[in-house]
Image (tube, helix red, strand yellow):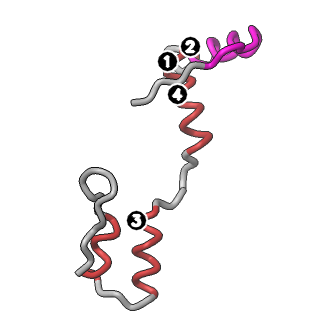
Amino acid sequence: MATLTVRNVPGEVHRALRVRAALRGRSIEAEARAILEEAVLPEGRVGLGSLLTAIGRRAGLTEKQSAGFAQRAPGRGHPVDLE
């Protein structure tokens, strides 16, 4: 996992975060992670694999042909074999 440092957080924001975390039974760090996740990964977002599968189905690909879209290739830069 990556590390993120946030500097110069106003005291009022830090206090509000501390209260919000306490109300949810989380640490300040866990609450900040949850807030960030909710902000950048909204519920209902469509993953790339799902989007490609839907496009493939509309294009008439078989289930076997489009199955590779939802698979993650091991490592980076390795294409998924669709044949």
Residue 64 is situated, as x and y percent measured from the top left of the image, at: 24, 80
Name the amino acid, label 4: Arg
Q: Which residue position holds label 3?
A: 49
Task: Name the disc covering residue 26, or none.
Answer: 1
Which residue is label 4 attached to? 33
Magenta part of the chain = 6-22
- Nearer the camera: disc 3 or disc 1: 3
Q: CA distance from mark 3 to mark 1?
A: 33 Å
Q: Are marks 3 and 1 in contact (CB under 8 Å)?
A: no
Magenta stretch: includes residue 21: yes
Q: Position of residue 8 (x, y in %)?
A: 71, 13
**Mark 3 or mark 4: which comes first in sequence?**
4
Badge 2 or badge 4: first in the primary sequence? 2
Choose mark 2 or mark 4, whichever is in front.
4
Vertical relation: 6 (above or below) 56: above
In primary-sequence order, the first of circles 3 and 1 is: 1
Q: Disc 2 marks which residue?
A: 22
* Inter-mark Cα distance, 3 to 2: 37 Å
Q: Nearer the viewer, residue 42 or 48?
A: 48
Amino acid type of the residue that numbered disc 2 sits on in the rendered structure: Ala
